Amino acid sequence: MPVLLISTYELGHQPFGLASPAAWLRRAGVDVRVIDAAKEPVTDEAIRGADLIAFHLPMHTATRLAGPLIGKAHALNPAARLCAYGLYAPLNADWLRSLGVSDVLGGEFEEELTAIAIGGAAPSPAATATQAQHGEAQRPSIPRLHFLTPDRSTLPPLARYASLNLGDGTTRVVGYTEASRGCRHLCRHCPVVPIYEGQFRVVQPEVVFADVTAQVAAGAQHITFGDPDFFNGPAHALRIVEGVHAAHPSLTYDVTIKVEHLLQHRDLLPRLRATGCLFVTSAVESVDDHVLALLEKGHTRQDFVDAVSACREAGVMLAPTFVAFHPWLTLDGYCDLLDTIADLDLVDHVAPIQLAIRLLIPRGSRLMELEDVQGLVGPFDPATLAYRWTSPDPRVDHLHRAINTRIGVRLTWDRREAFAEISALAHAAAGTEPPARPRASAHAPVPFLSEPWYCCAEPNPDQLRLV
């Protein structure tokens, strides 16, 4: 059965979600073709030549972008079996099936996808995880796989993907891998939660080492570890980075770690720095303790402040991300967020798009457990694949539109210039005077990836067109 795997968007990375299942399928003797639609066209010839067409949907933006391609595949090759896999597939199962998709796979999809390709098997109840879409309380059973080294041989070269800017004008080629999937935590707004329900699964160290080594041979000078939280299993994480550093001592990397874990394991931060960690992304989301409690983030405003200090003491840069706009936001609250970023000397650490992130509420979101959210949102919107909401204060929505308009097509905007303009807009809306523009930092240049991180947010039309 000829198989076509399609990725639409993976935050500017060479798609792990294509390379990993490609390895499984090729080991099984399947004729598989992979297309990263963010870098190359999905041709009519490729669609017509496949008996199974599978779309990787790891995030909301990827799912929105996949819709037209699924429709095209169904029209051009109605006999082909269509499959969707990844975090956002079960969350949007009904919509996907309305487009002609027959198989919907969630977490740890490689084995089930291979079974479909070689035998036409229907996915098991565990794989479909439809309870995530319909809000059922049953905990899904996530399989434990022994992974294979991802096969990246037919993907576009790493140099065509997001690069690392060291902050001084120099750049590095970036690779991407995963050392674990899922998460132990149950943050209300996180799309991982409806699929994994507090479970996480490790990728065997030898597989990670082999994948990193292959990417270094292909030119990678820096690796992004895409784990939802690198310290879900700190012993596993340290084994990975210490092994990678021993084999490739000049290689740098970045990881994502919760504020809660940064403080709980602050003694491990120097070991990250010693093994080449340039920065840690952390989903801070808000500096309002009430909002943090609603989101069940597991940290407070003061914890965030303490985490900034802990990372600075260890010599590891913290790159905070935010859900800047949410139903509980006030104009004063948004100004407080900006002023806090400036007071902590984090302006250079925050990508401008983080200041326009708007809360996404997809199907299966634990946010729908909150009565005040139920009273704020409208019906599920199949056009945006989310529950639509508006702020109780129209001025907040107006401010968001004004900021979004400026940021949407300026994703590489100078961070200090962007911050100053956004701060002026926000304080004017709130009727207050903005603080003096923050002075240039005295510390070292701040490294950042050329592709902004905004995976759990509502994309605006400009971002969809850019992708």
Image: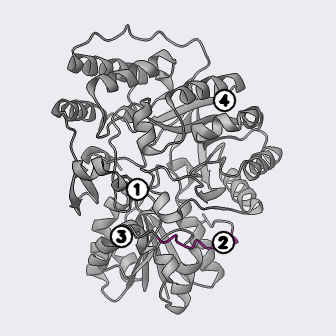
Residue range corresponding to the magenta coloring: 138-148
Whether pointer 1 and pointer 3 mark residues with C-beta atoms closer than 8 Å, the reply is: no
Judging by the rendered image, the residue that carries numbered circle 3 is 134
Q: Which mark is first along the chain, 1 or 4?
A: 4
**Mark nearer the viewer, 2 or 1:** 1
The residue that label 4 is drawn on is: 316
Secondary structure mostly taken by the magenta-highlighted segment of the chain: loop
Image coordinates for residue 5, horizontal then vertical, percent:
47, 72
Magenta stretch: includes residue 464: no
Q: Which mark is residue 144?
A: 2
Task: Give the foreground label among 4 and 2.
Answer: 2
- Residues at badges 4 and 1 in contact (C-beta under 8 Å)? no
In the image, is residue 90 above or below residue 59? below
Q: CA distance from mark 4 to mark 2?
A: 32 Å
Q: Which residue is mark 1?
A: 366
Q: Amino acid at mark 1?
A: Arg
Inter-mark Cα distance, 2 to 1: 25 Å
* Sequence-first tag of 4 and 3: 3
Looking at the picture, which amino acid does disc 4 mark? Val
Graded by Cα atoms within 10 Å as few (under 14), some (14 to 19) or many (20 or more), the crowding at tag 1 reads many
- In the image, is 277 to the left or to the right of 401? right
Against 363, residue 427 (above or below) is: above
Residue at the farthest right position = 246
- Percent x, y for residue 301? 50, 28
Name the residue at 30% across, 86% down: 78
Circle 3 crowding by C-alpha within 10 Å: few under 14, some 14–19, many from 20: some
Disc 4 and disc 3 in contact, CB within 8 angstroms: no
Residue 429, horizontal then vertical, whole percent: 21, 21
Q: CA distance from mark 1 to mark 3?
A: 11 Å
Three-letter amino acid code of the residue under disc 2: Arg
Please state which of the two labelled residues, at mark 2 or mark 3, is closer to the viewer: 3
